[in-house]
Image: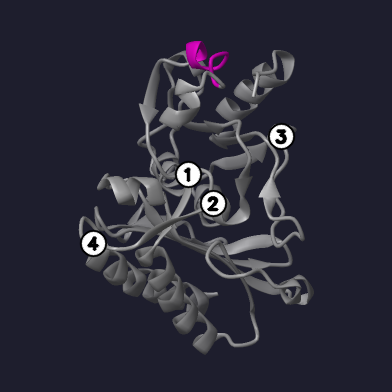
Amino acid sequence: MQKALEIAIQAAKEAGKVVMGYYQRSYDIREKSANNPVTTADLMANHQIQEIICHAFPDDGWLSEETKDSPDRLAKSRVWVIDPIDGTEEFIAGIPEFAISIALVVEGIPVVGVLYNPATAELFYADTGGGAFCNGTPIHCSPCRDLKQASMLVSQTEHQKGVLAGLIPLVAEIQYIGSVTYKLARVAAGTGDLYVTVRPKNEWDFCAGDLILRETGGVLWDKAGRTIRYNKKRVGQPTGLFAGNPTLVKQIIDFYSSKPVNV
């Protein structure tokens, strides 16, 4: 997987240059659906990533938030899962909490993951069995085992809507971070202990972060305590994703299951 990792890093960096060419400048914005914007930067970064990856691996499948989906990928054993900018709302607001997300999935399992925040110059990456790194330095998820001492990363929107109300009192601290991908990167690097969302997400939101987190000793589980399979026909993940070290994640899933949070 070394070549795949190198190409993914190259694609992320080149897309980062594209994104930063638009950041805090003028560009077009349109709504794909309610509260789901897409910008010129998203589309141009997607084009840059696709050009690099498809040139290097023309036979692989492709799944991206900003490319029309094709059922052809379902017959492929190797599929790239891409979000050219996860955290588009933060990008638009000029908040440096977004990231380019690139993952390679083989038979439903992520084997390469790259997350790049070009605004902060943080490059997170991993391949299966090779450990995880940020800018070349090994990273590890937090060893915290006590929810009462844990810091939980959440979406401010979810908190404001009250959908996490039953979970907030369980932890010592709440950190508001915009992008799903960037939250997973922060948990993988140990700067947060947990990430929880009870809203539906799509595969491209968390695929690369899942692999990076696994390589730091952490897990990303659904509300039944299962790992996620990728390159499914339906790319949406139903409510409930929980990330951190296995001990903390099991504790918070157990609480969530016993006293369901209203979503």
Mark 2 vs 1, N-terminal side: 1
Instruction: Find disc 3 in the rendering and name its residue.
Output: 225
Which amino acid type is shown beneath numbered disc 1?
Val
The secondary element bearing badge 4 is classed as loop
Residue drawn at x 44%, y 77% is 47
Which amino acid type is shown beneath numbered disc 2?
Asp
Is 124 part of what is drawn in magenta? no
Mark 4 vs 1, N-terminal side: 4
Q: In which quarter of the image is the C terminus?
A: top right
Q: Which of marks 4 and 2 is in front?
A: 4
- Which quadrant of the view contains residue 136? bottom left
Q: What number is the disc on residue 180?
A: 1
Q: Which of marks 3 and 2 is in front?
A: 2
Mark 4 vs 3, N-terminal side: 4
At which x and y percent is residue 169?
49, 10
- What whole-number distance in Å separates the C-alpha atoms at marks 4 and 1? 25 Å
Residue drawn at x 53%, y 15% is 165
The secondary element bearing badge 3 is classed as loop
Mark 4 vs 2, N-terminal side: 4
Which amino acid type is shown beneath numbered disc 3?
Gly
Instruction: Find disc 2 in the rendering and name its residue.
Output: 205
Residue drawn at x 23%, y 68% is 21
- Image position of 221 (left or right of 9): right
- What whole-number distance in Å separates the C-alpha atoms at marks 2 and 1? 6 Å
The secondary element bearing badge 2 is classed as helix
